[in-house]
Amino acid sequence: MVSEAPPFWWTKADWRAYALWPFSWVYGRVAAIRMDRARRAMPPVPLICVGNFTVGGAGKTPTAIALAQAAKARGLKPGFLSRGYGGSLDVTTVVDPGHHRARDVGDEPLLLAREALTVVCRRRVDGARRLAAEGADVIIMDDGFQSARLAFDFALLVIDSVRGIGNGHLVPSGPVRAPISDQLRHATALLKIGHGPAADRLIRRAARAGKAIYVADTVRLDGGSLSGVKVLAWAGIADPEKFYRTVREAGAIVEETRSFSDHHHFSEDEIADLIDRAASQGYTLVTTAKDMVRLEPGHGRAAELAAKSRVIEIEVRFDDPLAPAKIIDATLAAARARKLRANGKG
């Protein structure tokens, strides 16, 4: 899967998108076939997949965390399943935030492991079995909607209301991971994050197809403490502009920004540049929680950058406060129905 989204993917389709259309057509055919054939293995416990339509961040990780919190409120033990993108481990691993580093298990699993049991595994079927063995009674899979071999009891597709699906074209002409019709067919529900208009057309299409629609916002947890502060904002995520908007909404004065690729591991020169530039101009360094976990303790000046950077924490809050619990309940009901069918009783 492409990890970096060219800027033209997020604007009106131009000659670059149309020139790549033949490749997108082939990609789309393969992706559709893969989606139809992938979901064969039954998970050992109820499973929710949190995915998105496109390459790039839409808010999957904070959404997964919100669902885990709802599961715990139900008295369940949730477990996160991730492939550990950006990590080097190729064996099934229970993530230990106090021991593992982003280079080992990936940055997103480190964030997830703060909330609940987390397993990284290249083969999601094996990872699901390990979670069940560790006592998880509901699995929340972060990504993998278009390719996982596991069957889903509930598939929630997250879409950003500002970016939407970009130019609407398939990779490599655009950011869409598989034909929209095929993705909708396998989806259970959609979650629109924010109140912008870019996702509205797709939301209406999904509603006509009978899919449940949820709406949520990302909420800052910084308490407005950056009001009036001049900052250098830095981020290595899929949509850094979204983070910079969040910083401005916190009241900060964004004097400069530094954007890096998603899951980027910072070099000594990059770390030194951030520290020295902020010091010379009197700026406060601001970054994301995901970037902070990639600053490995004891690695050169990384500890210094971590100490000097302020983190803006966010969470996803559903417009309907009961929505996460409803998703958990629907997942459990679907899993019970699946087991009855497997036993020949449905």
Image (cartoon, rainbow, N blue to C red):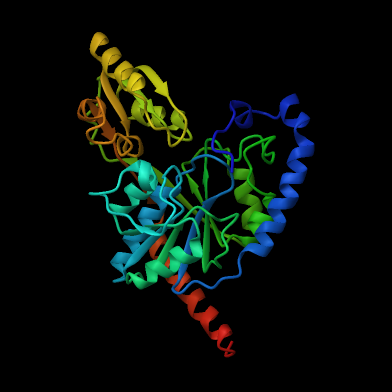
Horizontally, residue 118 falls left or right of residue 22, namely left
Q: Residue at x 56, y 59 (%)?
A: 148
The correct choice, above or below, for 220 with respect to 132 in the image is: above
Q: Quadrant of the C terminus?
A: bottom right
Residue 100 versus residue 308: which sits nearer the camera? 100
Q: Give the image quarter of residue 79.
A: bottom left
Q: Is residue 315 above or below residue 250?
A: below
| Residue ranking furthest to the top | 280
Image position, residue 28 (x, y; %): 72, 47
Q: Residue at the location (31% across, 43% down)?
A: 101
On the question of residue 176 being in view, the answer is: yes
Most foreground residue, 164 or 119: 119
Q: Where is residue 196 in the image (x, y as percent from the top left)?
A: 51, 37
Side of 26 relative to 212 (left or right): right
| Nearest the eye: 3 or 62 | 3
Residue 321 seen in the current view: no
**In terms of image quadrants, where is residue 332?**
bottom left
